[in-house]
Amino acid sequence: MTHKEPTLSISMKKVYVYKAFERFWHWSQAGLIIFLAFTGFEVHGSYKVLGFEHAARFHRVASWMLIGLIIFAIFWHVVTGEWRQYIPTTKKLAAQIRFYMIGMFRGEPHPTKKTGLQKLNPLQRITYLGFKLVLVPITVISGIIYMFHKIIDRNDIIVISSIPLKSVAFWHTLSAFLLIVFLLVHVYMTTTGRTPTSNIQAMITGYDLEEEEEEEPRENKSLTGES
């Protein structure tokens, strides 16, 4: 007689994680940031591809497109309640940091699971919140001041005209470099999912695979003396 003992087997189920607008916003924002970096550094004099006048014009148009996208994204996050995804938490934060530093190189399981209600792990929440509340505002505000600096000077608006143009350019350039660093790290981190491309596929299709544990009976012959 054999004794059947339940064991756990892992199966995968498809979960809808990223909504249509979320995916549109993500890829549009990424494309605009890359294009703004490309045209911005040409305006800065780093290289010559489009020519200064064309680069400056395209940079200005793309900047307004990004501002419009940001405003609409803020509205969407508020209306849908998705802003809650970015609420910071220290729960499993240490485990998440350890995973990125050590665990993922040892093949250890991810300490947090991605779901439609919880898309970001604790470290991502803090990072993306800083991106949205600090880095993006500095880039946008310094860019607007830089864009209208001469016009503002001509209109004698003292509050703005008293800001040195070199200072504005410094903060805008610094934030541009930080955006590029963030983008590069973000692209690298997408490869740390279940497979190197699973996170990118999820952001394209909206669906991700989630592990679910199922109990299966297992024959245990050690208790019966059978070999």
Image (cartoon, rainbow, N blue to C red):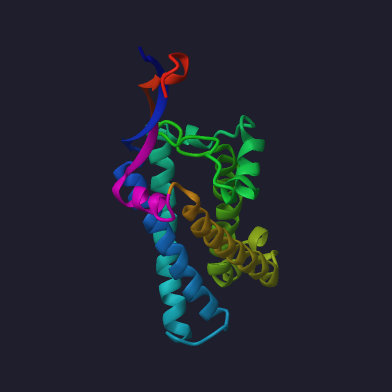
Q: Quadrant of residue 50?
A: bottom left
Residue 64 visible to an observer of this rendering: no
Is 123 rendered above or below residue 154?
above
Is 78 rendered above or below residue 135?
above
Q: Position of residue 24 (x, y in %)?
A: 33, 52
Q: Please name whichever residue, 162 or 71, is drawn nearer the observer in this view of the structure.
A: 71
Q: Over which residues does the magenta segment extend?
A: 195-211
Residue 20 visible to an observer of this rendering: yes
In the image, residue 201 lies in the stretch drawn in magenta: yes
Q: Position of residue 86 (x, y in %)?
A: 52, 37
Tell me the quadrant of the picture where the N terminus can be found.
Answer: top left
Is 180 rendered above or below residue 79?
below
In the image, residue 76 lies in the stretch drawn in magenta: no
Q: Quadrant of residue 89?
A: top right
Which residue sits at x=56%, y=40%?
125
Q: Please name whichever residue, 102 or 37, is drawn nearer the observer in this view of the structure.
A: 102
Tell me the quadrant of the picture where the C terminus can be found.
Answer: top left
Q: Position of residue 10 (x, y in %)?
A: 39, 32
In the displayed structure, does residue 10 sit left or right of residue 89? left
Q: Position of residue 9 (x, y in %)?
A: 39, 29
| Image label count | 0
In the displayed structure, does residue 22 sit left or right of residue 45? left
In the displayed structure, does residue 55 sit left or right of residue 100? left
Which residue sits at x=42%, y=38%?
77
